[in-house]
Amino acid sequence: MNTTVSSTTLPSPPSRWAQYYALTKPRVVQLIVFCAVIGMLLAVPGWPDWRVLLAATVGIWLVAGAAAAFNCLVEGEIDRRMKRTAWRPTAKGELADRHTLAFSALLCAVGCAILWFWVNPLTMGLTLATFVGYAVVYTVILKPMTPQNIVIGGASGAMPPVLGWAAMRGEAGPEAWLLCLIIFLWTPPHFWALALYRAEDYARAGLPMLPVTHGAAFTRLHVFLYTVVLFAGTLLPFVYGMSGWIYLAAAVALGIGFMVYGFKLWRDYSDTLARRTFRFSILHLSLLFAALLVDHYLSPWLAAAST
């Protein structure tokens, strides 16, 4: 039998542009930018200046992409040991380290320039600090050092609404920090649900993730406990007066749903349930912030219509 494989049947390698694009972790950055845009829209009573909104969105996207690329550079060897990340261009050796570093530096420089000249210096400074927090403090220092890496490092990942708020207001008010707190509390149950069914990957890579260092049972309990704390945190925008009943109803429904997932994960674990919990966590945050936006624009109209 002729076992020669035609070259036309072999998968072609991704283009160079596709490799660079993959470095930016598009799905992660999309959620970051989404939360930042929500912060921009909530910061003003009406529709914001579209020029500032566009510049801030592009600038934050570029710096977030730069941080993701730098993360890929630093963790190239770790990514090679993990099934979930072995496909990344840096893990496969498709991109040289110097090219990845140059790409990250270029994105960061252009993004910071856009934020400085077309938004405001505060937003640029906060966005750059977020880059350092994720790319250096979390990736280089915390992630290989402590199982609480995602808790402490989650502070940088929780910053997008603050960046968006600062872009519109030129300051970071308490409302922005409430949104930041919600993402900060959301990050551990979101990420630990993933870590539970990827524990072997993390152990192979030598990373001290919570399921590796403290076991699955301990991690499952803490996922559930964090969903309870998160539920309380999601009520704060209503308590503070920055949202109305529309948001409250959504926060209660989504919070109960997340707690149910967390409880089931704690009491009757399976990898399938962990995957479902992880996917629901993304839906939870997206719908929660979407509800804030709907409430922001609809509640004043409903109040005016009822008078």
Image (cartoon, rainbow, N blue to C red):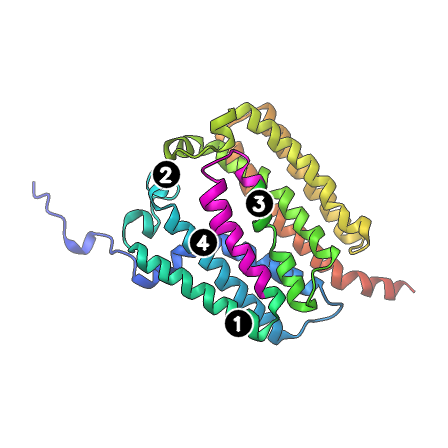
Give the image location of residue 165, x and y in percent. 67, 62
Give the image location of residue 99, x and y in percent. 32, 60
Q: Residue at x 75, y 58 (%)?
A: 295
Sequence order check, earlier mark of 3 and 2 = 2
Q: Which residue is mark 4?
A: 68
**Which labelled disc corresponds to residue 144?**
none
Note whether 55 is above or below 248 in the view shown. below
The dominant secondary structure in magenta is: helix
Q: Which residue is mark 3?
A: 154
Element type where label 1 sits in the image: helix
- Left or right: where does residue 249 sit relative to residue 116? right
Is residue 190 visible in the rendered image? The answer is no
User: Relative to the observer, which residue lies in front, 296 or 226?
Assistant: 226
Q: Determine whether label 1 and label 2 are within 8 Å by CB.
A: no
Give the image location of residue 157, x and y in percent. 56, 50
Give the image location of residue 141, x and y in percent. 47, 42
Q: Determine whether label 3 and label 4 are within 8 Å by CB.
A: no
Q: Amino acid at mark 2?
A: Met
